[in-house]
Amino acid sequence: MTLKNEGHTLGNMLQMGLQEDARVLFAGYSLPAHSQIPLCELKFRLRPGYDAKQVLQETVQARIELVDAVTAQLTAPLAIWKQPPPPSRSSSKGSKRPRGEPE
């Protein structure tokens, strides 16, 4: 299978997903250097009796779910990190603490 305008990111993600599947005997990808357009050639071999299209669809769906889970895990911490810092409380003028340090 050849994927146009794709590179190592998607190739590696699909290869790893396929390799985790017990129905898959071999999975790999390559990026041909001679191509005018970026191409990712995905190759995989299944155990007898399985449908390649179904296995690939399930692998893609599992990878989508993985990306969604990672996104959900990072969303809350990133939202907190992006919040502006609370206004600093000024203490007495003779404080030796550098500005912005917590009290």
Image (cartoon, rainbow, N blue to C red):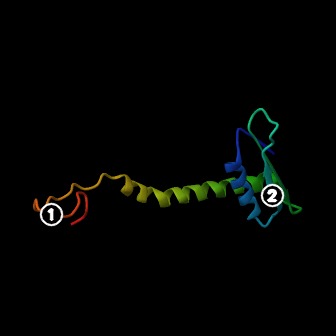
Q: What number is the disc on residue 67?
A: none
Residue 11 vertical position relative to residue 89 in the rendered view, above or below: above
Q: Mark 1 — residue?
A: 95
Which residue is painted at 75% across and 34% down in the image? 37
**What is the three-letter code of the residue carrying label 2?**
Ala
Q: Position of residue 94 (x, y in %)?
A: 11, 62
How would you rate the neighbour count of disc 1 (Cα within 10 Å): few for under 14, some for 14-19, many for 20 or more? few
- Image quarter (top left, top right, bottom left or bottom right) of the C terminus: bottom left
Is 27 left, or right, of 6 in this rendering?
Answer: right
Q: Secondary structure at mark 1?
A: loop
Disc 2 to disc 1: CB gap under 8 Å: no
Give the image quarter of residue 62: bottom right
Residue 19 vertical position relative to residue 10 in the rendered view, above or below: below
Which residue is painted at 74% across and 38% down in the image? 38
Q: Earlier in the sequence, mark 2 or mark 1?
A: 2
Q: Position of residue 61 (x, y in %)?
A: 66, 54
Q: Mark 2 — residue?
A: 27
